[in-house]
Amino acid sequence: MLLNVSRALTAPGEEIPFLHRDEIPPQEIFGETVTFSDVLLTGHYAMVGESLRLEGKLTAVAHGHCAGCLKPVDDPLEVPFDEIFTHVERYPHRPENAPEDEDERLVFEGSSVELSHLALTLAVLELPMRFTCGESCPALGALQPDDSQDSHACQKDMPDQHPFSALQQLLTKDQEV
């Protein structure tokens, strides 16, 4: 969805508040479909030199399933952002000697800025590695190690061994030759 920034174009340097509702389509992440609701970007924007600066925060609710018991889980997201957009007319094409990361520049055309891609990127990067329904999840509780065991069985058999002991032995053998 587009954010009209014509006020910033006519009043450079003036910070203008905005509230922008957006939609993020369902995303397939690690084989699970994650949906989003209540996507809202708030903050302010201003023309700074040749660029438009948007600063604020994204709030949304991500909907997934618990990695243990598969119950539906809602995860509220709140992500601050500070992004610079370049006007297309002021940056018509990439110069030949421009650095590689210049292709990743955020741009806008006319007096509107497309914020859907920004909202999607911010939300997906803020997602947890896996959704959980909390410490009371019976499936995740069953996977937790027993408190009476303070190490793995393989460590009990060889208490003086550590994961890199084989490498240490190779180094020692090489030095003896």
Image (cartoon, helix red, strand yellow):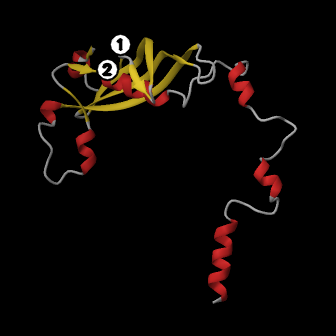
Q: Residue at x 26, y 38 (%)?
A: 105
The residue furthest right is: 148
Q: CA separation, marks 1 and 2? A: 7 Å
Residue assigned mark 1: 22
Q: Are marks 1 and 2 in contact (CB under 8 Å)?
A: yes
Q: Earlier in the sequence, mark 1 or mark 2?
A: 1
Q: Residue at x 80, y 59 (%)?
A: 158
Q: Position of residue 111 (x, y in %)?
A: 19, 19
Q: Position of residue 39 (x, y in %)?
A: 42, 13
Q: In the displayed structure, would residue 139 be above or below residue 152?
A: above
To which quarter of the image does residue 23 belong?
top left
Nearest to the observer: residue 51 or residue 160:
160
On-image quarter of the N terminus? top left
Q: Residue at x 40, y 30 (%)?
A: 82
Compared across the picture, whether 32 is left or right of 161 comes to left
Residue assigned mark 2: 116
On-image quarter of the C terminus? bottom right
Nearest to the observer: residue 9 or residue 108:
108
- Type of the residue with mark 1: Asp
Q: In the displayed structure, would residue 173 be above or below residue 143?
A: below
Nearest to the observer: residue 151 or residue 10:
151
**Number of other residues with Cα within 10 Å of mark 1, as a class: few under 14, some 14 to 19, many 20 or more:** many
SS under mark 2:
helix
Nearest to the observer: residue 5 or residue 49:
5
- Type of the residue with mark 2: Ser
Q: In the displayed structure, would residue 176 be above or below residue 121?
A: below
Compared across the picture, whether 25 is left or right of 58 comes to left
